[in-house]
Amino acid sequence: MTLITKASGEIETFKEDKLRLSLERSGVDAGEIEKIVREISNRLNEDISTNEIYRIAFNMLKKDSWPFAAKYHLKRAIMELGPSGYPFERFIGEILRHQGYSVRVGEIVRGLCVNHEIDVIAEKEHYHFMVECKYHNQPGNLCSVKIPLYIQARFKDVESAWQKLPGHATKFHQGWVITNTKFSSDSIQYGNCAGLKMLGWNYPSKGSLRELIDSLGLYPITCLTTLTKLEKQNLLDRKIVLCKDICTNERYLIQAGVGKSRINAVLEEGHKLCHKLISDGKH
């Protein structure tokens, strides 16, 4: 039995099946999975961490297959959107916009009692959502129960004002909590009891944030292994958060300082990662 250290500092038993599943979710073929599992199994020791296991697998994928490495990097890529949460809010706004919602990001909204700065407001037909994004740029952090408690209080104040607007009496209003990490059990229990929509990295078991990103093909630019950290930050500073945006606008790469000799490599990786969106014509 090999023990490993999680990002939270907890110690758990190394589970080969868990590693295999994460690689399968990234689209890695069976042969490559066996190669990676064998390499990691040969290097296991009592002091290894989940971060080291990830690094070994990621480096092997990066060497042999860019798109699979980019998908495997997704969770950490979202953490690279920071340190502030604003790029994550824009990323969530783009996911909702792609699903047909009209979206506003970072707006001041008048509540019944006070004004509130709302991360994302999403509307479609008779649905009207107040979305709060709880972003973490370090692994191992939990979204505790105080978060949905606080958001529910804000939402009820905003909802009271929204219901007084013309045409809103029959609309369905709801508060959402979206996090790129995990919810505590108490936060899930309270959120569901209060009627909040809870969306986390692996929650709910069907339709989690991870599954939503994969199903839509909306990957953040921080997934790309062919871009440097500085180039990614330059794109984020220009409010470019989606891989698909650089695939359809090469000039963004030029503006971000990507050299001409590397642009084709970046575009190749981007097209392989976003081929579903591009082939569907969903620009």
Image (cartoon, rainbow, N blue to C red):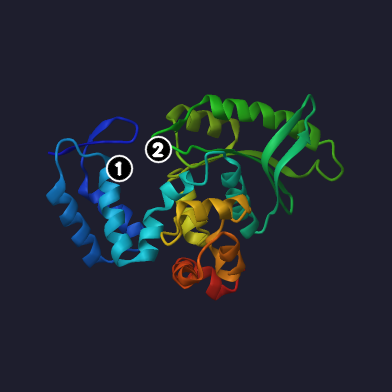
Q: Are marks 2 and 1 in contact (CB under 8 Å)?
A: yes
Against 91, residue 227 (above or below) is below
Residue 275, how many percent across, how many down? 49, 71
Disc 2 target residue: 139
Residue type at mark 2 is Pro
Structural crowding at the residue carrying mark 1, measured as other residues with C-alpha within 10 Å and reported as few (<14), some (14–19) or many (≥20): few
Q: Is residue 219 visible?
A: yes
Residue type at mark 1 is Asn
Placement of the N terminus among the 4 image quadrants: top left
Provide the secondary structure element on which disc 2 rests.
Answer: loop
Residue 123, how many percent across, how many down? 72, 50
Placement of the C terminus among the 4 image quadrants: bottom right
Give the camera-side residue of 46 and 171. 46
Task: Please identify the quarter of the rendering in which residue 6 is found.
Answer: top left
Residue 110, how many percent across, how many down? 80, 33
Give the camera-side residue of 257 and 107. 257
The reply, left or right, for residue 278 in relation to residue 153 is left
Q: CA distance from mark 2 to mark 1?
A: 10 Å
Give the camera-side residue of 14 and 68. 68
Against 142, residue 99 (above or below) is below
Disc 1 target residue: 51
Q: Earlier in the sequence, mark 2 or mark 1?
A: 1
Provide the secondary structure element on which disc 1 rests.
Answer: helix
Structural crowding at the residue carrying mark 2, measured as other residues with C-alpha within 10 Å and reported as few (<14), some (14–19) or many (≥20): some
Task: Please identify the quarter of the rendering in which residue 52 is found.
Answer: top left
The residue lying at 62 percent from left, 49 percent from top is 90
Extreme residue toward the right, this view: 166
The residue lying at 70 percent from left, 41 percent from top is 173
